[in-house]
Amino acid sequence: MNRLAFFFARLLRREGFFQAASQPEATLLARLKGKRVALVGNARALAEADHGAAIDGADVVVRLNGAPMPAARSHGTRTDWLAVAFIRLYDPLWQRLGRPRLLWISPKLHRLTWTVARQPDFYRYPVARYRQIKAELGPGPSTGLMVIDLLSRSDLAELRIYGFDFFASHTLSNDRPLDQIGHDGGGEAAWAARLFARDPRLIHVK
């Protein structure tokens, strides 16, 4: 992707430009075939657990947004994929996390940075899929819910989901009151529970 073209397209909110620049979803998800994947959410309650070793033992570790890791004991240390929507991701954080593969999950473009867009395997979660889930939930889905949806469509062997209590313990991602976060925790929990019931590869670790 050309840098000047990126800034011009972002300024004008050219959705088609970024969707066309995205690698096909099938190409992205083919990398997970047969893999054991750990998805690490940002629920504050995860800091009280001892899942770090199990997380780092997965074939692929996926984290969200700023990827807070208060302690290796609870959160592990590896980040192979980073799904970004809520924050503007710049090079210092990307470098500190070990240069993970970056996924742009948000339907909005104003937070998309050159750090994310310049990746040779740039991926953008489809806006149409975001709108479909939003129509089911009412409020816009969280980054975590969209990533669960995305990963579940791969041929992975197992997806263990850590740090997801759907805002019951709040989130390490920000300090705003829950009524200002803009997501329906109860609705997301029910949506995810239906998916977990259909797909035994998805294991919600509580």
Image: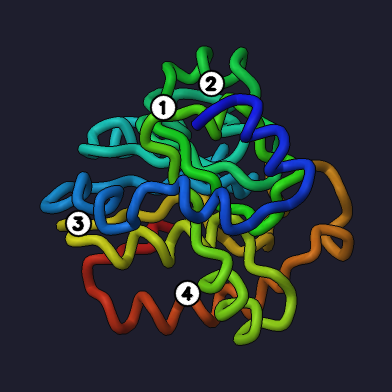
Residue 176 vs residue 140: left or right? Answer: right
Marks 3/4 in contact by CB < 8 Å: the verdict is no
- Tell me the SS state at disc 1: loop
Q: Earlier in the sequence, mark 4 or mark 2?
A: 2
- Label at residue 156: 3
Q: Confirm or deny contact between disc 4 and disc 2 (CB under 8 A).
A: no
Give the distance between the C-alpha atoms of the residues marked 4 and 2, in whole angstroms: 29 Å
**On the image, numbered disc 4 is attached to which residue?**
192
State the image quarter where residue 70 is shown. Answer: top right
Earlier in the chain: of badge 1 and badge 2, it is 2
Q: Earlier in the sequence, mark 1 or mark 4?
A: 1
Q: Position of residue 177 (x, y in %)?
A: 88, 55
Residue occupying the point 60% across, 39% down: 65
* 1 or 4: mark nearer the eye: 1
**Could you classify mark 3 by the number of other residues whose Cα lies within 10 Å: few (under 14), some (14-19), or many (20 or more)?**
some
Q: CA distance from mark 3 to mark 2?
A: 25 Å
Which quarter shows the C terminus? bottom left
Q: Residue sitting at 56 percent across and 74 percent down?
A: 189
Q: Are marks 1 and 2 in contact (CB under 8 Å)?
A: yes
Q: Secondary structure at mark 4?
A: helix
Determine which residue is flagged by label 1: 100
* SS at circle 3: loop
> Which of the two residues, 58 or 16, is positioned nearer the viewer here?
16
Image location (x, y in percent) of residue 56? 30, 31
- Residue placed under numbered mark 2 in the picture: 94
Residue 194 visible at all: yes
Judge left or right: residue 135 versus residue 95. Answer: right
**Which residue is more in the foreground, 27 or 99?**
27
Q: Is residue 46 above or below residue 126?
A: above
Identify whether 5 is placed above or below 34.
above
Instruction: State the separation of the CA atoms marked 3 and 1.
Output: 19 Å
Residue type, numbered disc 4: Ala
